[in-house]
Image: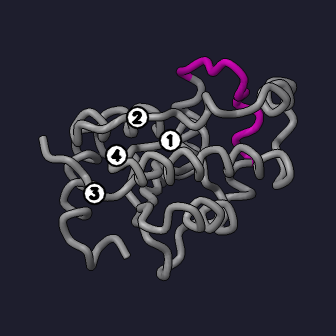
Amino acid sequence: MSAIEVPLVVMGVSGSGKSTTGSKLAGEFGVEFIDGDDLHPAANREKMAAGVPLDDEDRAPWLDTIARRIADELAAGHPIVVACSALKRTYRDRIAALAPTTVFVHLDGGSDLIAERQRGRVHEYMPTSLLASQFDVLEPLEPDEHGFRVDVRRTPAEIVDEVRRRLASPVEHG
């Protein structure tokens, strides 16, 4: 196990494996893992549970909470791993504004694969009916962003190995 020096945001649509991958990465690197879902305000949870997609206004305070937490932990010398959908470039920019060294790990997979995964799980407030809206909003990482894409067809262990390798190579993570 070796520590990381930068915070990681494991991003992607619901069902892409953010929580599973994020917790495995945190364990591998010996740092704290935070599931961004746990930081949603009650109003956001209620809206999603009712099958209504969140909009930018709903997400703004949640993203600010995540960004502050990452920045505060980093300022204390503790980079962390956070699972957060971070679907749009503006959302990632909002996080990076407070924590500019954050590396975004985009768990990327096709809608059919993710839908199949979602059928096999129950989420407290994220119904499978919202998956299409997440793909509609998703803006993949752009070349100038600090991060990289990882194919979710790989096993969690393979994903962790790839993230470790890519973090060790600055050219590969922006």
**Amino acid type, mark 2:** Phe
Front: mark 2 or 4: 4
Residue 136 locus on image (x, y percent): 74, 57
Q: What whole-number distance in Å separates the C-alpha atoms at marks 3 and 4?
A: 8 Å
Give the labeled residue for mark 3. Answer: 5
Residue 19 locus on image (x, y percent): 46, 33
- Residue at the image point whose x is 39% and y is 39% from the top: 22
Circles 3 and 1 in contact, beta carbons < 8 Å: no
**Amino acid type, mark 1:** Ala
Q: What whole-number distance in Å separates the C-alpha atoms at marks 1 and 4?
A: 16 Å
The answer to whether residue 49 is above or below residue 132 is above
Q: What whole-number distance in Å separates the C-alpha atoms at marks 3 and 1?
A: 17 Å
Give the labeled residue for mark 4. Answer: 78
Circles 2 and 1 in contact, beta carbons < 8 Å: yes
Q: In which quadrant of the rendered image does the N terminus lie? A: top left
Q: Is residue 37 left or right of residue 83?
A: right
Residue 83: numbered disc: 1
Q: Secondary structure at mark 4?
A: loop
Between 119 and 89, which is closer to the camera in this rendering? 89
Circles 3 and 4 in contact, beta carbons < 8 Å: no
Residue 121 lies in the magenta-colored region: yes
The numbered mark, 2 or 4, whose residue comes first in the sequence reads 2
How many numbered dots are placed on residues in this image?
4
The numbered mark, 3 or 1, whose residue comes first in the sequence reads 3
Q: In which quadrant of the rendered image does the C terminus lie? A: bottom left
Give the labeled residue for mark 2. Answer: 33
Residue 3: numbered disc: none
The answer to whether residue 128 is above or below residue 2 is above
The numbered mark, 2 or 1, whose residue comes first in the sequence reads 2
The numbered mark, 1 or 4, whose residue comes first in the sequence reads 4
- Residue at the image point whose x is 52% and y is 33% from the top: 35
Start-end of magenta stretch? 120-133
